Image (cartoon, rainbow, N blue to C red):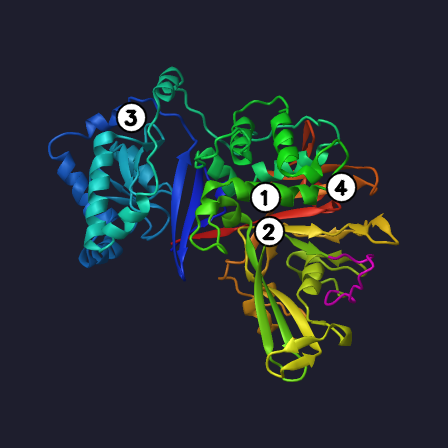
Amino acid sequence: AQRTQNPDTRRVLSTSIKYQSGSFIISFRVELNVSSVMSPAGCSHVNGYKVDNWKQNLRVIYQCFVWSGTAETRRRKAKSCICHICGAHLNRLHSCLYCVFFGCFSKKHIHDHAKNKRHNLAVDLLYGGIYCFVCQDYIYDKEMEQIAKEEQRKAWKLQGMSLFVSTLMSKYTTWEPTKRELELLRHNPKRRKITTNCTIGLRGLINLGNTCFMNCIVQALTHTPLLRDFFLSDRHKCEMQSNSCLVCEMSQLFQEFYSGHRSPHIPFRLLHLVWTHAKHLAGYEQQDAHEFLIAALDVLHRHYDNGKKANNPNHCNCIIDQIFTGGLQSDVTCQVCTGVSTTIDPFWDISLDLPGSSTPFWPLSPGGDGSAVNGESHLSGSTTLTDCLRRFTRPEHLGSSAKIKCGGCHSYQESTKQLTMKKLPIVACFHLKRFEHSAKLRRKITTYVSFPLELDMTPFMASSKESRMNGQYQQTVDVLNNDNKYALFAVVNHQGTLESGHYTSFIRQHKDQWFKCDDAIITKATIKDVLDSEGYLLFYHKQFLEYE
C-alpha cells in the first residue's frame, strides 16, 4: 500500500474510488494535474530523445524498473533502484532516460543530474510518468504513453491480474478531449501554477435572505479535499432526465469556485434545489446549519447514480458515503451474565453534548494539572473536544427503568451501553449541541470548547476499548500509527441568540492559511482566530489515506 499525505497539500488533485468485497479493497486514483495547461502539440523536448533504439530502451526501463512484472525484475528493482547520490530507496526516485542514473526527485538529485548532463527527461519509477526538466512538468507523448501502457499490461499478465483489472477498468470510460476543449487549449497554452499564495477556490456567496446557514456549509463542502477533487475530475455522470439533480448543481458550483473568478457567487439555483428536495428548509426563515448539512448530504447521496446500483443495499459506494460515512458501534452489556449485544450503525456526523446543557456532564479528568491531550490545553474549568468525545464513548448505565431482554439470561436485566467508533470516515464532522430545545426550555449554550488543529481518534475506537478502564481516558502513544489522525480544515460558527443569529465559517486554504467566510466577504484569519472561536460544526480530514 502506498501512503500519501493529505491530498490538499499536493499540486495534483487526486480522487480515490474504492471497491470493497469482504475484506478486500482496491482503490483507483484519478489524477488531474492543475499545475499547467499543456499545448495539444505536447513537449517538443522529447524529439531529442527519439533517436536510434529509443523505443527498445524505454521498454527495458519500464520492464525492469517501473512495472516489474516478474519476481526477478522486482528483486532487481528493489536491489538496484537507489539514489546514486544519497543511496535512498524512497524520495520519489526517477530514472534518467539518457543514461543509467537514479536520483531523488524530492531532494533534487535527479534535477542536478539533468542540469549537469543536459539529460532533460526522466521517468517516475513508481507511477511511470515522464518528467521534462526544461518544461518543469510531467509531459504527455502519445508514443511514450503507448509503450508505457503496453508494458503495464504485460506486467499485469505476468502477475495474473490482467483479467481482474480489465474487468474493473471496463466500468470506466476514458477521458478524451472534445473539439471545443482542444480549441481552447490551442488558444490558451499559457501555464498556470498553483502556489502556496494562490487564492483560487476562495469565493464569497451572496446572502439571498437569511441563507447564511447554507453559505457556511457550502464553503466547508467546497473546501473538502477529496470532494473537491472528485467534482473537478468530472466523475459524476448524471442519468436523471430532469434539471433537478443536486449533484450536477454541486459539480457546477465547484467549477464556479475554482474558475479563478473573485466576484461573489449567487447560489440561487442551489437554494431552489434545496427547497425542492428538502421542503422543511424552504422559506426565508433562519435555518440550522447542521440540519442543512445533513439534508444536503442526504440529497446528494440519493441523487448520486452509483448509490442506487450498490449490490449490497446496506453498503453504498457513492462519493458522499466514501468520504463522510463512518460506523458507530454500540455495545450493550448485561449486568448479570456480562453478555454483550453489539450493533453497528452508519453516521455522517457525531453530535456531542456540552456542559451547561440539561444533560449531566461528568467532572473533568485528566487535565487539572494543565496537561495536554490531543494537542488541547486542559485548564481548570475548561472543556475540550476530547472531553466531549470521552463522555460520548464512556459506558452509560441504563438503569432499572430501561431494562433490556438479555439473550443469555432470557429475561429483562439492567445493562450498560457504550458507544465507540468501529470505522472512521475520511472526513469527521463534530456537531457541538449548542441549541437546546425542550418543553420547558429553548436556549443557546455558549460554553467555550477548545478544539485542536490535529486530532487523534485512536482512544475512541472500538479496537482501543480494552485500553480504557471504566470509561476513563488512557493516552496511548503510537507514533507509527497514523490511520486515525485528523487535521482541522473548516469551522462553522454561530453568533447571536437562538431566535436571531448569523453563521460564518473559517476555511483552511493551504496547510497554515485560514480565511473567514462571512457570506460575500472573505478576509484572512489567523490560527488563533480559528481556535478562539466558539465552534458549532468542526470538520476534520484524515491526514493519511491508504491506496492499495
Circle 2 crowding by C-alpha within 10 Å: few under 14, some 14–19, many from 20 = many
- x and y percent of residue 91 in the render? 37, 48
The mark closer to the camera, 2 or 4, is: 2
Mark 3 belongs to which amino acid?
Cys
Real-space CA distance between mark 2 and mark 3, rounded to the nearest whole angstrom: 45 Å
Mark 1 belongs to which amino acid?
Leu
Disc 1 designates what residue?
297
Disc 4 designates what residue?
494
Real-space CA distance between mark 4 and mark 1, rounded to the nearest whole angstrom: 21 Å
Residue 228 drawn in magenta: no
Compared with residue 510, is residue 391 higher up or lower down, i.e. above or below? below
Residue for point 42% across, 46% down? 17
- x and y percent of residue 102 in the render? 27, 45
Q: Secondary structure at mark 3?
A: loop
Real-space CA distance between mark 2 and mark 4, rounded to the nearest whole angstrom: 21 Å
Disc 2 designates what residue?
348
Span of residues in magenta: 353-367
- Find residue 418 and report its image quarter: bottom right
Residue 43's label in the rendered image is: 3
Q: Is residue 34 visible?
A: yes
